Every structure is written in C-alpha cells, then in structure tokens.
C-alpha cells in the first residue's frame, strides 16, 4: 500500500499503459482520477473517478483539476501517459496539421496538465509529476520526425520543470518505454506493411532482452517514481526498454 489515501491523476487512462497504471495504483491504495478522451467502459467509485477530456484544450484541462480540488482538496501526483503515434513516412509526406496534432498531444498536454497540477501539489507540500516519453527520443529511426521531436521536447520540458519545482518539493521525472506490446505499436507501421511482421522483425528483434515491453512494466516504473522510495529522484530519465537505448 505504497500510495494509501494519496491522490493521483493518470492521463491516457484508457490505453494499455494507462489501464495498467490505474489498476496498480488502486491496488496500492491510491485514489485515482483517470483521464482520457473516451473510455471503453467506466464506472466511478469511491477510489476511481473517470473524466473524459481533451488534454490539448486549456479549459477542459482546467476542469479536470477543478474537479480534483473539489473532490479531494489536494493532489499527490500526476502521471502523463497520454500520447499519439506517427505512421512512419518521409518528412515530405508529413502535413503541417499532422505535425501540429502530434506536438499538441505529446507536448502541449504536458504543459497544460503540469501547470494546472502544480498549485495542488504545492498546496499538498510536494508531490511528483511523471511524464512518459519514448526511447526514440535518444535512439531515433527514420520516418518518425514529428513523434521523435515531440518526445525529445517532453524530456527537455520535464528537466526544466524539475529544476523549477525542486524547492517546492515537487519532483519531475521521465520514463522512456521501448517498443511496447500495446495497440499503439501497430500505428508506427508503415503504410502497406504487415503489422505482425513489423512487430516481430522491426520491434521485438530490436530489443536486446528479446521481448516487448509490457504495460505493467511502465506502470511499475511510474509507481516507483511516484512513491517515497524515489524521494531524492528528480530530473531523471528511466529507461524501460529492454536495452534498446544502449
């Protein structure tokens, strides 16, 4: 029960990693505000409140944290798992609207959620923000210019925020997942390629440990970075990638 009675906002909560994180944090005694654009199924309980919101919309993000303050009056941690992929393509085939959408979801959402979370974290006497980026930020590959740029920006933003918030007792860290066994993996598949072949030949074989990252691996990393066990960890980038970033 490492998070007993603590309050966490988890974004991207309807995705594979998000569902794993929500489940784990509830098991560890937290109360969770689960946020995503839509949910396959949702049932509010005393421990878990589901909120549908567009994280690129300033007013909707403000509304999320207004609910947190109204319901709980405090916040212990924010975990940003929301993100969008990019189908591999040459830069000449990437439109401005595609670029802007990827930047909005993968970077602007971090700015908006962090900005609105900080007053509640400060009011609580401290807390944590954990942003999920990608191993591609340090090991780029062709055709993912917008995605890679957005994840690099997520790291730089997180490190800057870690410095800014340290004196307030607020820690900010990053997780770099490697190729993960979630529905998003198929979205990186080039047009006309077989997703199963790409998953095996391109992704799994690129991981030195020989297996894809599981959603639970990322949830466990987020739990560590959000817990008191990581009380002296801030500005860190934790690779959960099976060695792919080496």
Image (cartoon, rainbow, N blue to C red):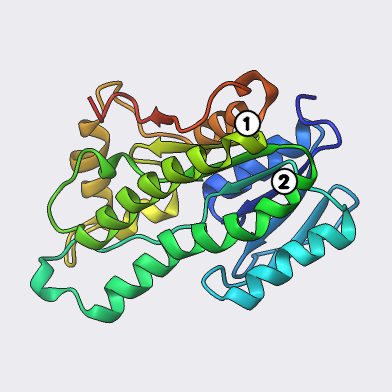
Looking at marks 1 and 2 on the same chain, the residue that comes earlier in the sequence is marked by 2
Q: Which residue is mark 2?
A: 121
Q: Is residue 8 left or right of residue 114?
A: right
Q: Position of residue 89 (x, y in %)?
A: 15, 65
Q: Is residue 24 left or right of residue 137?
A: right
Q: For the view shown, which residue lies furthest in the front direction?
A: 167
Graded by Cα atoms within 10 Å as few (under 14), some (14 to 19) or many (20 or more), the crowding at tag 2 reads many
Q: Which residue is mark 1?
A: 223
Q: Position of residue 27 (x, y in %)?
A: 77, 33
User: Residue 97's quadrant in the figure?
Assistant: bottom left
Q: Which is nearer the eye, 96 or 121?
A: 121
- Compared with residue 157, is residue 5 higher up or lower down, i.e. above or below? above
Q: Position of residue 144 (x, y in %)?
A: 21, 57
- Compared with residue 135, is residue 63 higher up or lower down, i.e. above or below? below
Q: Quadrant of the C terminus?
A: top left
Mark 1 vs 2: CB contact within 8 A: no
């Amino acid at each position: 029960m490492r998070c007993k009675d603590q309050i966490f906002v988890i974004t991207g909560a309807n995705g594979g990693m998000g569902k794993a994180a929500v489940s784990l944090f509830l098991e560890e005694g937290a109360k969770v505000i689960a946020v995503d654009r839509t949910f396959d199924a949702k049932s509010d309980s005393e421990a878990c409140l589901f909120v549908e919101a567009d994280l690129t919309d300033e007013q909707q993000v403000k509304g999320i944290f207004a609910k947190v303050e109204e319901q709980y009056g405090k916040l212990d941690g924010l975990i940003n798992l929301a993100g969008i992929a990019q189908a591999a393509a040459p830069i000449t085939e990437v439109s401005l609207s595609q670029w802007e959408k990827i930047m909005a979801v993968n970077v602007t959402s971090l700015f908006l959620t962090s900005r609105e979370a900080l007053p509640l974290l400060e009011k609580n006497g401290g807390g944590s923000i954990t942003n999920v980026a990608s191993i591609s930020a340090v090991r780029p590959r062709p055709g993912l210019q917008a995605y890679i740029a957005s994840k690099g920006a997520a790291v730089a933003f997180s490190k800057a925020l870690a410095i800014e918030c340290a004196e307030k007792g607020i820690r900010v860290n990053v997780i770099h997942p490697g190729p993960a066994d979630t529905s998003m993996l198929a979205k990186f598949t080039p047009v006309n390629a077989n997703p199963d072949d790409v998953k095996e030949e391109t992704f799994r074989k690129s991981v030195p440990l020989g297996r894809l990252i599981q959603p639970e691996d990322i949830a466990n990393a987020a739990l560590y970075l959000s817990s008191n066990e990581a009380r002296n960890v801030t500005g860190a980038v934790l690779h959960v990638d099976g060695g792919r970033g080496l």
